[in-house]
């Protein structure tokens, strides 16, 4: 008899968990549901800092998500190093988040779970950062959403491949 596997767990991480990572989680959750993988993949988000813990997402992020048909429920929280043990993939939204997550990772094996979101977008330029839209206009949130959507397709393929490997 095969051991029972838990869901594949993905956590998106940005700075304060009110703009980029909740947008990425919302988009990816929708992709997972569309692919019929809702019961097999859990999607979450967090921030490297705790400035906004307990807050909702930025109203501009919520507005852009809503206008594009994505879910908007969110409560900000800070990423905890203990989470690495239960996560399969930790998706950083820019290089500074990736560096901070590597610093927080308890072991090299857990640090290997960290990836940049745009590394899953074959059309992304050499700079794989998703720029922080917080200090800009609504256009920055639209740009963020476009980058997240472009990378989500490749990420879904990678997660599906991992699920198939688990099942084999």
Image: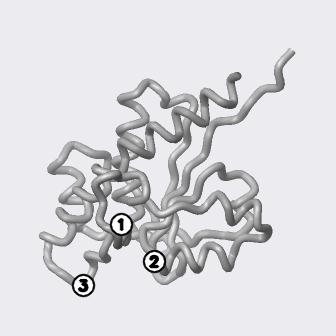
Q: Residue furthest top?
A: 1
Q: Establish if 136 lies above or below 163.
A: below
**x and y percentages locating residue 79 in the rendered image:** 60, 69
Most foreground residue, 23 or 147: 147
Mark 1 → mark 2, Cα distance in angstroms: 8 Å
Q: Quadrant of residue 164?
A: top right
Residue at 44% x, 76% y is 16
Q: Establish if 164 lies above or below 140.
A: above
Q: How is the image coloured?
A: one colour
Q: Quadrant of residue 143?
A: bottom left
Q: Are marks 1 and 2 in contact (CB under 8 Å)?
A: yes
**x and y percentages locating residue 9 in the rendered image:** 60, 46
Count neighbours of disc 3 (C-alpha within 10 A) and say few if under 14, some if 14 to 19, many if 20 or more.
Answer: few
Residue identifier under label 3: 135
Residue identifier under label 2: 15
Name the secondary structure under disc 3.
loop
Residue at 35% x, 52% y is 121
Residue at 38% x, 60% y is 118
Q: Quadrant of the N terminus?
A: top right
Query: Which is more N-terminal, label 2 or label 3?
Result: 2
Q: Quadrant of the C terminus?
A: top right
Left or right: 129, with 159 as reference point? left
Name the secondary structure under disc 2.
loop
Residue identifier under label 1: 20
Query: Which is more N-terminal, label 1 or label 3?
Result: 1
């Amino acid at each position: 008899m095969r051991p029972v596997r838990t869901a594949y767990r993905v956590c998106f991480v940005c700075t304060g968990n009110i703009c980029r990572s909740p947008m990425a989680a919302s988009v990816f959750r929708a992709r997972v549901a569309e692919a019929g993988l809702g019961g097999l993949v859990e999607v979450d988000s967090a921030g490297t800092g705790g400035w906004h813990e307990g807050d909702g997402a930025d109203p501009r992020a919520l507005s852009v998500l809503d206008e594009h048909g994505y879910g908007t429920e969110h409560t900000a929280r800070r990423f905890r190093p203990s989470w690495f043990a239960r996560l399969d993939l930790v998706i950083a939204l820019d290089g500074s988040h990736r560096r901070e997550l590597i610093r927080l990772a308890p072991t090299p094996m857990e640090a290997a779970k960290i990836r940049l979101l745009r590394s899953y977008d074959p059309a992304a330029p050499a700079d794989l950062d998703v720029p922080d839209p917080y200090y800009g206009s609504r256009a920055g949130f639209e740009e963020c959403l476009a980058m997240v959507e472009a990378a989500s397709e490749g990420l879904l393929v990678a997660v599906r491949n991992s699920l198939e490997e688990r099942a084999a």
